[in-house]
């Protein structure tokens, strides 16, 4: 009796329609933003690519460094008077 129930359960399991496996959703990656930069002492531009978030961090750090240099310099430009 047990074998009959077991074989019926297996038969019902194998006849069920198989649902196709869901394709894994692609990870949404940020499109890189490229900028051309000319290194100091060069005339050849170099292409640099980062994400928007990385560019925001780089720009913020550069702005902070520039402000710090202006503050330390006290408005002196180095030009002769």
Image (cartoon, grey):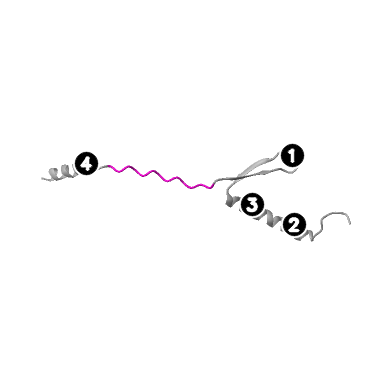
Q: Mark 2 near mark 3, Cβ–Cβ under 8 Å?
A: no
Relative image position of residue 50 (x, y in whole percent): 59, 46
Separation of marks 2 and 1 at Cα, in angstroms:
25 Å
Badge 2: few (under 14), some or many (20 or more) residues near its Cα, within 10 Å?
few
Q: Which residue is mark 1?
A: 43
Secondary structure at badge 2 equals helix
Mark linked to residue 69: 2
Q: Residue at x 23, y 43 (%)?
A: 16
Q: Which residue is mark 3?
A: 58
Separation of marks 4 and 2 at Cα, in angstroms:
75 Å
Question: Considering only order in the chain, which callout, 3 or 1, is on the residue closer to the N terminus?
Answer: 1
Q: Residue at x 79, y 58 (%)?
A: 73
**Location of the N terminus (image quadrant):** top left
Question: Considering only order in the chain, which callout, 1 or 4, is on the residue closer to the N terminus?
Answer: 4
Q: Which residues are magenta?
A: 18-30
Separation of marks 2 and 3 at Cα, in angstroms:
17 Å
**Horizontal side, residue 25 vs residue 42: left or right:** left
Question: Considering only order in the chain, which callout, 1 or 2, is on the residue closer to the N terminus?
Answer: 1
Secondary structure at badge 1 equals loop
Quadrant for residue 61, please give it: bottom right
Question: Considering only order in the chain, which callout, 4 or 3, is on the residue closer to the N terminus?
Answer: 4
Q: Residue at x 70, y 55 (%)?
A: 65
Quadrant for residue 5, please give it: top left
Q: Nearer the viewer, mark 1 or mark 3?
A: 1
Q: Nearer the viewer, mark 4 or mark 2?
A: 4
């Amino acid at each position: 009796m047990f074998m009959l129930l077991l074989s019926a359960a297996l038969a019902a399991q194998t006849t069920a329609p198989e649902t196709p496996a869901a394709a894994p959703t692609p990870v949404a990656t940020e499109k890189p933003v490229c900028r051309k930069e000319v290194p100091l002492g060069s005339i050849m531009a170099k292409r640099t690519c980062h994400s928007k978030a990385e560019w925001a961090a780089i720009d913020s750090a550069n702005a902070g460094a520039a402000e710090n240099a202006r503050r330390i310099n006290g408005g002196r430009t180095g030009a002769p008077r």
